[in-house]
Image: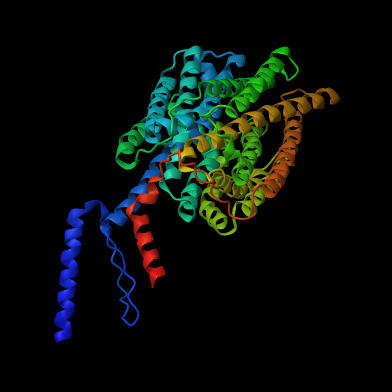
Amino acid sequence: MTSRRRMRSLATEGTLDAAQETRKHPARREPAVARTPRRGTKMSAEVVTHPAVGAEDRRRWLALAVIVTAQFMVVLDISIVNVALPSIKTDLNFSQESLQWVITAYSIFFGGFLLLGGRLADLFGRRRLFMAGLSLFTVSSLLDGLAWSEGSLIAFRGLQGLGAAMMSPAALSILTTTFAEGRERNRALGIWGAVAGSGGAVGVLLGGVLTSAFSWPWIFYVNVPVGVAVLVLSPLLLQESRADLPNRYFDFAGAATITSGLMLLVYGMTRATQHGWGTPETLGLLSASGVLIASFFLIESRTKAPLLPLRILRLRTLAGSNLSALIATAAVFSQFFLLTLYMQQVLHYSALKTGVAYIGLTVTTIALSAVAQGLVTKFGVRRILPVGLGLSTVALVLFAQLPVAGHYFWDLFPGFIISGLGLAFVFIPMSIGALTGVRPADAGIASGLINTSQQIGGAVGVAAATTIATTFTNRYVHSHAGSTAFSGPALTHGFQIAFYALAATAAVGAVIAAVLIEPQRAQAEPEPEADERQVPATSQHTPVCRSRRVLAGELQAN
């Protein structure tokens, strides 16, 4: 009895001391967590979890849903317009030469401003730039649907691309600073990668449905209610963060050279598909682009506050993932482009039927996203990414066998399923690898870099595939009397050669990923010097992470 009274007395004194300490230092209060018992005591099966821990964890995953929804709109808008182009041409009296600018205007501003958008997110606040870009994107979508002429639609599409360039890298950097590197971030990036991999196919499907059921303005109007909902939820669910750098200098020279260089590159690639690669205008644009991009890297190596810190390119996994992204998107974006043309021009599918044809690919990509991120977490980026690019190579070889009178289930469907497998095992490890080892202060620029790699790769790939297909279609016409450039056999021949070229590109990407990416888990980038202060990731200071640190410390002590 005496010992029991003494224990109760000690417990009471400890409780009072703890309460006094809490009143003195309220900021040091920790959430209630399970305690590891001392040796010789019985262990209870009950684990007590503070409500704040679960609430904070739910908030992070709700925040992920918000930024992934915004990113889905961006990816969707790249492909949703393609199937509506014939209707837009008729209603707004577009010329054939000007029609391409509906896509080109968006691509130029989106691809050109991605790096700048990523760094602005680091400097001025990731949530702030995300919401600003989302607002511009939503308003521009409404104006796109209300466009009254070809000039107005092209201008509003440029604004929409600018909004996407602000929003997309900010969204990915919010993900990076919300989830600590490892299993949780890989799960989050698995969802992000599933959206990136399937968004193009969903865009074709949704574009066909909306154009057939309503009219072409609805491919833009659909963004408005979604954008407004995300804007309302963002202040409630997203936490603000930015890089706390030793100086607030902005690299105007670097921003000007890389933005103008990338815009000229996208424009030059687009012009090459229409007027040829050897014309003086095309060569001038591409040369000027090369000079500006080279000048950017020279500026970045000398400035004290670079837009793109070149040290992050020394991270092998990051560099390899970005190079793989450049090659993979060149093959994937071109694959969607050529398959859509094949189904509509050779098989004479309607816009709706063309969209529905992509369901097998879309479902496969989404269904395997969780499997892909789990495998990356277990085996690493280097072992999974080459497998994904290898599967994409197989799918492209199958598409190169497509006949003139193709059957959906026997000729297209097997390739769609294998391509869906490949996309899941490409985009998810690629997204994880591109952010591996990056300092929290560089989350925005690293996000802008991977988005830029994907966008530029897609632009180069589509331009090259279009040129190859057109060239070999014309050769077929010249060697087959009575054939025309719009006949099924001529078009199919050009598509087949282009698919073979894309398959070779994907195979090269698989080799590069296997060689360049680090075999083991990439080490984090060295911490900054004493005068280079950084803002740590928000998620490292959540109740969830504090609880884990307390548990780890007690387990180690016992």
Identity of the residue drawn at 75% across and 31% down: 494
Q: Position of residue 539 (x, y in %)?
A: 39, 49
> Which quadrant of the figure has residue 288?
top right
Above or below, 278 against 311 in this view is: above
Identity of the residue drawn at 54% across and 20% down: 253
Above or below, 200 against 217 in this view is: below
Identity of the residue drawn at 28% across and 66% down: 48
Q: Position of residue 548 (x, y in %)?
A: 38, 60
Please indicate, yes or no, whether residue 487 appears anywhere in the rendered image.
Answer: no
Q: How many marks?
A: 0
Q: Quadrant of the C terminus?
A: bottom left
Q: Position of residue 279 (x, y in %)?
A: 73, 14
Q: Nearer the viewer, residue 553 or 479?
A: 553
Left/right placement of residue 473 relative to residue 155 reads right
Above or below, 532 against 144 in this view is: below
Left/right placement of residue 128 relative to residue 437 reads left
> Furthest-front residue in view?
530
Chosen colour scheme: rainbow
Identity of the residue drawn at 40% across and 35% down: 126
Q: Position of residue 468 (x, y in %)?
A: 74, 29
Left/right placement of residue 465 relative to residue 550 reads right
Please indicate, yes or no, whether residue 203 appears anywhere in the rendered image.
Answer: yes
